[in-house]
Amino acid sequence: MNEPRPPDPIPLETKDTATILAGTGLWVVALVVVLILRPSPDHQWWIWTCVAGIGLGIFGCWFVRRRDQRAARGEARPDGTRDDASVPGRTPS
């Protein structure tokens, strides 16, 4: 019952910005398709769903780049802790 816990796995290195840009690109494609097909007045919300997806993708890209820049500089978070753990090759302070 009291077996030692296995070590935590090493975090995967991901390309968050590329993933967000790919998703945003898909929302752009969806918006173009919806605008070409011209939905009925009852389905105008499809257009705004695509616009919201694009807007959230742009915000997500900005947020992730800002987070990565802060982590690379080793700046402190608002709660006073450092964000070195998210940078590959760095050990937390």
Image: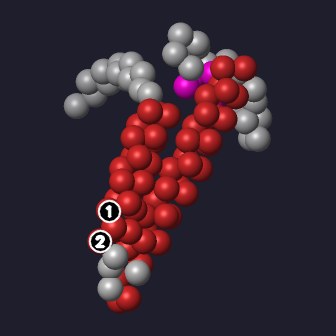
Q: Which x, y percent locates residue 24?
A: 44, 48
Q: Within the magenta stretch, is there residue 84?
A: yes
CB under 8 Å between callouts 2 and 1? yes
* Residue depicted at 42% across the width and 26% down the height: 14
Question: What residue type is disc 2 on?
Answer: Leu
Range of the magenta residues?
82-86
Placement of 7 over or under 2, stated as above or below? above
Q: Which x, y percent locates residue 12?
A: 38, 23
Question: What residue type is disc 1 on?
Answer: Val
Q: Quadrant of residue 93?
A: top right
Return the residue nearer the eye: 2 or 69: 69
* Residue depicted at 38% across the width and 88% down the height: 41
* Residue depicted at 49% across the width and 34% down the height: 17
How was the colour assigned to the protein in this rendering? secondary structure
Residues under labels 2 and 1: Cα distance? 6 Å
Task: Please give left or right for residue 13 compared with residue 87 in the image.
Answer: left
Kindly give the residue lying farthest to the front in the view shown. 36
Task: Please give left or right for residue 55 compared with residue 40 in the image.
Answer: right
Q: Which x, y percent locates residue 31?
A: 40, 62
